[in-house]
Image: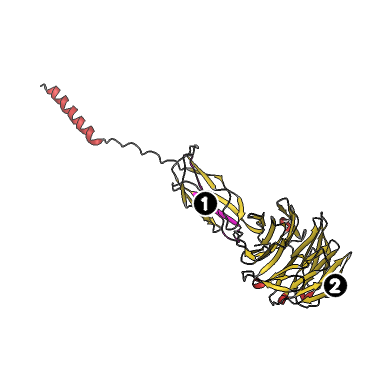
């Protein structure tokens, strides 16, 4: 080997060793993190429904890539963030379309605004927020087979205490804070007038009438003019508008009834009775100083019955009001009859009385709840309602409890037939 070739070889070897010791092959860069999935609301947002009831439309979200490709088999978390409601699951998996759902039962009164959040566990993924509005149920309807919610409202400051049905398609209900009109109206399944019930100091306690264009409502409190804190108000509806028929600042009026379009009776505290016969209201002597809470007039005779505190019953025979012996001391809150010889009165502690044209006798109600209203479509179909969700029905022989499926304190019952019955409460 020549001296030159040896030198070249040494240089090559040395260079090879030098390169190997000074350079390292860099590993490939890590793949970018997956893009956070997008959670989008599809169904169920901005619903309204009764407190403590499941919303009719489930909450549905879609989970997609940022480019809109559905992502299946992803866990979606669900949580109530406002309103104390309940969900059927705290998580659910997306299906092949990238969708997940859950059913939402709203929380209790008075949580008007309620909300639920849906989110995934992927870092950087934004969730979706659902909202809902809770509503009070103020009226139920019975169609002869089942009970359903007839009037729901987010106007949670109102109470409907009484009502009256003019026909199968027209009814009225009255309560607190309504002034113009003083009663809300039901027409072919739709209630109207609730939006005006928010500022009035009036408390309407009774509604009755003879026809859709002849309806009366009675109450007390502040009227249309805030300077008029009258204790007695009687309003009349002529089919198109409500007008004030009577008002004064004397003793409260509590209930109204009719015998005919020309004979209207209003009763109230300390035995007060005023009667509209023809064209004017006239005070009448009741024969009692006890509070009177309800009145019913027989359209086919001259008889009128009013009931009240301490078992009070007074009756008008066409000439004068006379006291009757009830045999009880419980307050009587409601009265109704199919005739002057078949009259029912209900009251506190489950009290039910029946008048046969001669005397009042107690009937077994099967409850100790306070009863507030009574109404029937015939002698063999009479309803009584009261606190604790109590609904009773009389079949001509005995009273039995009726399950409505709703837990409310009922204040009144009215209707037009055994298959068109309303109850109010909250």
Nearer to me, 193 or 315: 315
How many other residues sit within 10 Å of disc 2, few (<14), some (14-19) or many (≥20)?
few
Where is residue 2 shown, x and y percent of the image?
Answer: 11, 21
Magenta span contains residue 103: yes
Whether residue 203 is visible to the viewer of this picture, yes or no, is no
Whether residue 43 is visible to the viewer of this picture, yes or no, is yes
Q: Residue furthest right?
A: 279
Identify the residue at horizontal 18%, vertical 31% (top origin). 14
Q: In the rendered view, would you say 123 is above or below 422? A: above
Left or right, 173 with reference to 110: right
Identify the residue at horizontal 52%, vertical 45% (top origin). 61
- Of the numbered discs 1 and 2, the one sitting upstream in the chain is 1
- Residue under pointer 2: 283
Where is residue 353 shown, x and y percent of the image?
Answer: 70, 71
Q: Quadrant of the N terminus?
A: top left
Q: In the rendered view, would you say 72 is above or below 129? A: above
Give the mark toward the camera: 1 or 2.
Answer: 2
Where is residue 190 shown, x and y percent of the image?
Answer: 71, 51
The label on residue 117 is 1
Per the model, the C-alpha gap separating discs 1 and 2 is 62 Å
Q: In the rendered view, would you say 383 is above or below 54? A: below
């Amino acid at each position: 080997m020549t001296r030159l070739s040896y030198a070249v070889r040494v240089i090559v070897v040395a260079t090879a060793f030098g390169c190997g010791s000074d350079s390292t092959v860099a590993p490939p860069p890590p793949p970018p993190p997956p893009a956070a999935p997008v959670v989008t609301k599809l169904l169920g947002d901005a619903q309204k429904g009764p407190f403590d009831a499941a919303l009719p439309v489930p909450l549905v979200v879609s989970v997609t890539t940022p480019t809109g490709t559905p992502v299946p088999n992803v866990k979606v978390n669900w949580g109530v963030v406002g309103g104390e409601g309940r969900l059927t699951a705290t998580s659910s998996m997306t299906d092949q379309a990238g969708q997940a759902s859950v059913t939402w039962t709203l929380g209790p009164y008075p949580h008007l605004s309620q909300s639920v959040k849906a989110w995934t566990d992927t870092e950087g993924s934004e969730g979706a927020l659902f909202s809902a509005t809770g509503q009070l149920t103020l009226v139920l309807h019975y169609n002869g087979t089942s009970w359903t919610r007839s009037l729901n409202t987010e106007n949670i400051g109102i109470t409907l205490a009484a009502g009256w049905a003019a026909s199968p398609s027209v009814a009225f209900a009255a309560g607190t804070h309504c002034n113009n009109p003083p009663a809300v109206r039901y027409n072919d399944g739709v209630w109207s007038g609730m939006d005006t019930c928010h500022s009035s100091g009036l408390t309407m306690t009774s509604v009755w009438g003879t026809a859709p264009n002849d309806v009366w409502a009675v109450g007390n409190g502040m009227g249309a003019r805030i300077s008029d804190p009258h204790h007695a108000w009687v309003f009349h509806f002529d089919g198109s508008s409500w007008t004030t028929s009577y008002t004064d600042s004397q003793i409260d009026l509590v209930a109204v009834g009719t015998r005919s379009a020309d004979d209207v009776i209003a009763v109230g505290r300390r035995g007060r009775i005023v009667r509209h016969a023809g064209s004017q209201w006239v005070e009448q002597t009741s024969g009692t100083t006890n509070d009177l809470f309800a009145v019913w007039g027989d359209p086919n005779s001259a008889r009128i019955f009013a009931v009240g505190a301490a078992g009070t019953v007074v009756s008008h025979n066409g000439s004068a009001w006379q006291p009757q012996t009830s045999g009880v001391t419980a307050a009587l809150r409601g009265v109704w009859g199919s005739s002057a010889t078949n009259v029912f009165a209900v009251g506190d502690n489950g009290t039910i009385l029946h008048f046969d044209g001669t005397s009042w006798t107690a009937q077994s109600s099967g409850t100790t709840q306070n009863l507030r209203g009574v109404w029937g479509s015939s002698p063999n179909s009479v309803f009584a309602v009261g606190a604790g969700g109590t609904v009773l029905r009389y079949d001509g022989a005995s009273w039995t409890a009726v399950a409505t499926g709703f837990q409310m304190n009922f204040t009144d019952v009215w209707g037009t037939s055994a298959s068109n019955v309303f109850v109010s409460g909250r």
